[in-house]
Amino acid sequence: MADGRIITVFAAKGGCGKTTVATNLATILYDRGAHRVCLLDLDLEFGDAAGMLGLRSERSMVDALPVVDQLTPETVASLMTSYLPGFDCLLAPTRPGDARLISASLVSRLLAVLPLVYDFVVVDTPSRFGPHVLAALDVADHQILVTTPERPALKNLRVTLDMLDLLPYDRTARSIVVNRFDARSALPAALLDELLRSPIAGHLPTWEGVPASINRGEPLAVAQPDHAVSLAFRQLAAALLASDGRCRRDPPPG
Ligand SMILES: Nc1ncnc2c1ncn2[C@@H]1O[C@H](COP(=O)(O)OP(=O)(O)OP(=O)(O)O)[C@@H](O)[C@H]1O
Ligand SMILES: [Mg+2]
């Protein structure tokens, strides 16, 4: 049975590129079938992981409700939408109002089983803290925090880091990724460092091929593996593979 790693991708500002990062990272970690990968879409109201992969949502987390007390590798398999052999997606609900049926405890239960089946579970999130996102951050072996290089996004990332620092997470198992980086309009590196007071793990350049790949429903990392953005994704994935950092909460004493 796999002892998979959970990677939770979060940004406290909408549109920073969480889903772009999550889908591309999942694709690279899949490595043409070398690893079993699950992409979990926790953007329960407006999930668009399926759209970015060109998938039709036939099943979703809502299908977990009748089996909530019997979540096993076998029952979880029946909730998946297959993207490629060994690369499955557990999609967000599609019917209006269904998001509220998904509890944070269901998310925790799913995240307890998924690493038994998959080598990597990549979790895409909405851009606000809530019990579902916290459930996914709590059990994450690695937290990826995405920002763009503009003051409002950086300010939200600073607030996020302050919040995460209040929780017993391992700071070394956290990566900051600056997406839509453009040297011409970016803040000076020193100012970025001062705002974040944390090291930056990767810079993803702005490139018009990113929205084009989203519209084709094909992750850029596959469609154009040699482009600088794909290279930056691969470097991020390589750093994840090289680190064995775990940032799960310490078990309560006693
Ligand atoms: N490096 C990039 N270069 C150019 N465009 C990009 C880049 N990264 C993301 N985008 C564009 O930014 C938009 C938002 O990206 P994405 O949907 O991944 O963000 P998100 O954080 O998941 O948004 P939401 O908060 O709505 O879930 C998309 O239209 C995408 O095409
Ligand atoms: Mg998104």
Image (tube, grey):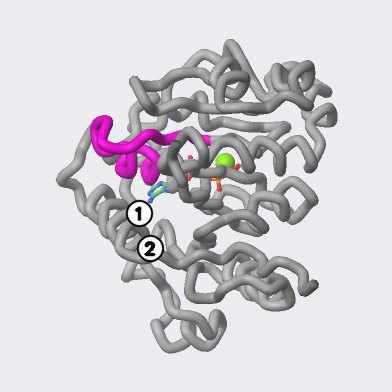
Q: Is mark 2 within 8 Å of ligand 1?
A: yes
The image shows residue 226 at horizontal and vertical percentages of 15, 45
Residue type (three-letter) at the residue carrying disc 1: Thr
The image shows residue 175 at horizontal and vertical percentages of 46, 67
The image shows residue 108 at horizontal and vertical percentages of 71, 43
Using the image, determine if residue 103 lies above or below residue 240. Answer: above
- Residue at the image point whose x is 74% and y is 19% from the top: 67
- Residue at the image point whose x is 42% and y is 74% from the top: 200
Find numbered disc 2 in the image and state the secondary structure of the residue it sits on: strand
Q: Image quarter for residue 53? A: top left
Q: Residue furthest front?
A: 254
Which class describes the residues within 10 Å of circle 2: few (<14), some (14-19), or many (20+)? many
Q: Which secondary structure class fits the magenta region best?
A: helix
Q: Image quarter for residue 34? A: top left
Find numbered disc 1 in the image and state the secondary structure of the residue it sits on: loop
Q: Any magenta on residue 213?
A: no
* Mark-to-mark CA distance, 1 and 2: 6 Å
Q: Magenta segment range?
A: 24-39
Image quadrant occupied by the N terminus: top left
Relative horizontal placement of residue 96, taking residue 19 as reference (left or right): right
Using the image, determine if residue 78 lies above or below residue 134. Answer: above
**Which label sits on residue 220?**
none
Q: Is mark 1 within 8 Å of ligand 1?
A: yes
Q: Which residue is mark 1?
A: 206
**Which label sits on residue 181?**
2
Contact (CB < 8 A) between labels 1 and 2? yes
- Residue at the image point whose x is 38% and y is 69% from the top: 201
The image shows residue 133 at horizontal and vertical percentages of 70, 50
